[in-house]
Image (tube, grey):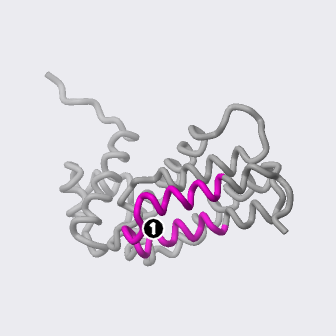
Amino acid sequence: MPGEQRNAPRTRSEVLAAAARALIEQGPNVSLDAVAKEAGVSKGGLLHHFRTKQALIVGLIEEWFDHYDVTVERLLEPEDTPGRWTRAHIRATFETDDDLWSHPSVVTALLGVPELQQRMDVAATRWRQQTDSDGLHPQRADLISRALDGVTLADLLWRGQESAEEREHTRDLLLKLTEQTGPLV
């Protein structure tokens, strides 16, 4: 019986999942050999998809951004009402239960990737365009965007420091800010 046919997108996804697990288990200095072993592929197979460890980390970043974008789209209200993109971003930010991006090993590995800032800038520009064209006053949109940045940073640096109730309260306050469209002051 012939072996299972290769599927590059599935293999790439499995390698990324393995890289995430290996980063958490072994820390930011995890080797490509360890990732390949965790993924059940040869090192050559891993290098086919990601030529360097940095490329692998960039792949993780891109996968996370893609996942976030899909989550925002899923949470987008069907009716065309002011604030719907902003509400979807608020809900997506608070819905994220992925420990990967708040794990210290992953944060440390990310800080060593020069392309991180460029990738973040592209994603942030896309997200900002969505919220800026959302029908909310710029003051309102800016305050909410900056608050979401703060929530994300707090998740990275101080994970587990706030209770589920505190997070829900913050989410609900931000959602409440989208109920009106005018300036804040």
Dot 1: element: helix
Task: In the rendered view, tell whether residue 43 sits above or below residue 77.
Answer: below
Task: In the rendered view, tell whether residue 47 sits above or below residue 26.
Answer: above
- Residue on which disc 1 sits: 155
Q: In which quarter of the image is residue 6?
A: top left
Specify start and end residues of the magenta stretch as a single range.
146-175
Magenta portion: prevailing SS class: helix
Please provide percent x and percent y for residue 83. Answer: 74, 48
The structure residue drawn at horizontal position 53% and vertical position 44%, both measured from the top left corner, is 71
User: In screen coordinates, is 164 left or right of 125?
Assistant: left
Task: In the rendered view, tell whether residue 110 sits above or below residue 95.
Answer: below
Task: Name the amino acid type tagged 1.
Answer: Asp
Please provide percent x and percent y for residue 169. Answer: 54, 59
- Total tally of numbered discs in the picture: 1
154 drawn magenta: yes
Please provide percent x and percent y for residue 170. Answer: 56, 61
User: In screen coordinates, is 141 left or right of 32?
Assistant: right
Q: Quadrant of residue 22?
A: bottom left
The structure residue drawn at horizontal position 81% and vertical position 53%, both measured from the top left corner, is 136
